[in-house]
Amino acid sequence: PSIPGLRLYKNLKKIAEKKGVSFYGSAEITGFKAEGNRIIDITIKKPGRPDNVDADAFILSTGSFVSGGLFSDKNNFIETVFNIPVHSPEIEELFNEDFFKLGHPIEKSGILIDNNFKPENAEYRNLFVAGSILAYSETMKYGCGHGMAISTGVAAAKSAEEYLK
């Protein structure tokens, strides 16, 4: 990252922390707890012992395959935190193609959302989704990963804010 980029990050982080946002850099989520159709906390791996982080709303923005937000073998597609359903192209379409070409069908895999950035096929009403984990994002094909993350992150945060009102 560039020096201006680091400065921007630090300043935005300070503003967010003043508004009550907590940051857990590179923390691995190892589990979660739900009551009915609400997620009440997530468990993150920390040196020593795990830590539970509770919230009234959650935004899933773990990325797709490269960052570990999605996982696939030849038969299944899995969202790795909340195990919500993953949309994917037909398996035959995926493994009969040149796997390293831009626009490979696997880039269409991800979480389907409604107009409020809530996952369509999940029971959790306080969960929102943003970034390259979204179905049909195709960030490699279009070279738009950061723009996708920022724009959908803002939209998901606005929807979460509305939910919390």
Image (cartoon, rainbow, N blue to C red):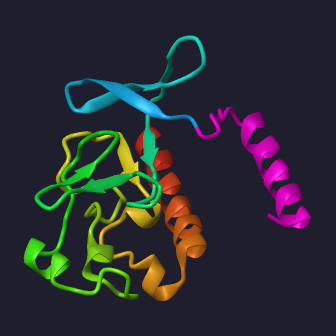
- Magenta-tinted stretch: 1-26
Q: Is residue 21 left or right of residue 106?
A: right
Report whether residue 165 is seen.
Answer: no
Q: Is residue 44 left or right of residue 86?
A: right
Q: Residue at x 27, y 74 (%)?
A: 106
Residue 21 drawn above or below residue 61: above
* Number of numbered tags placed on the structure image: 0
- Magenta segment's dominant SS is helix
Query: Residue 120, located in which quarter of the rendered image?
Result: bottom left
Report whether residue 26 is seen.
Answer: yes
Q: Residue 141, position in %: x, y?
A: 44, 86
* Magenta run includes residue 18: yes
Q: Residue at x 83, y 64 (%)?
A: 5
Q: Residue at x 18, y 68 (%)?
A: 88
> In this view of the protein, which residue sits in the foreground, 108 or 117?
108
Q: Residue at x 57, y 22 (%)?
A: 46
> In this view of the protein, which residue sits in the foreground, 129 or 96?
96
* Magenta run includes residue 16: yes
Q: Is residue 81 left or right of residue 130?
A: left
Residue 71 drawn above or below residue 20: below
Q: Residue 62, position in %: x, y?
A: 46, 51
Residue 96 drawn above or below residue 146: below
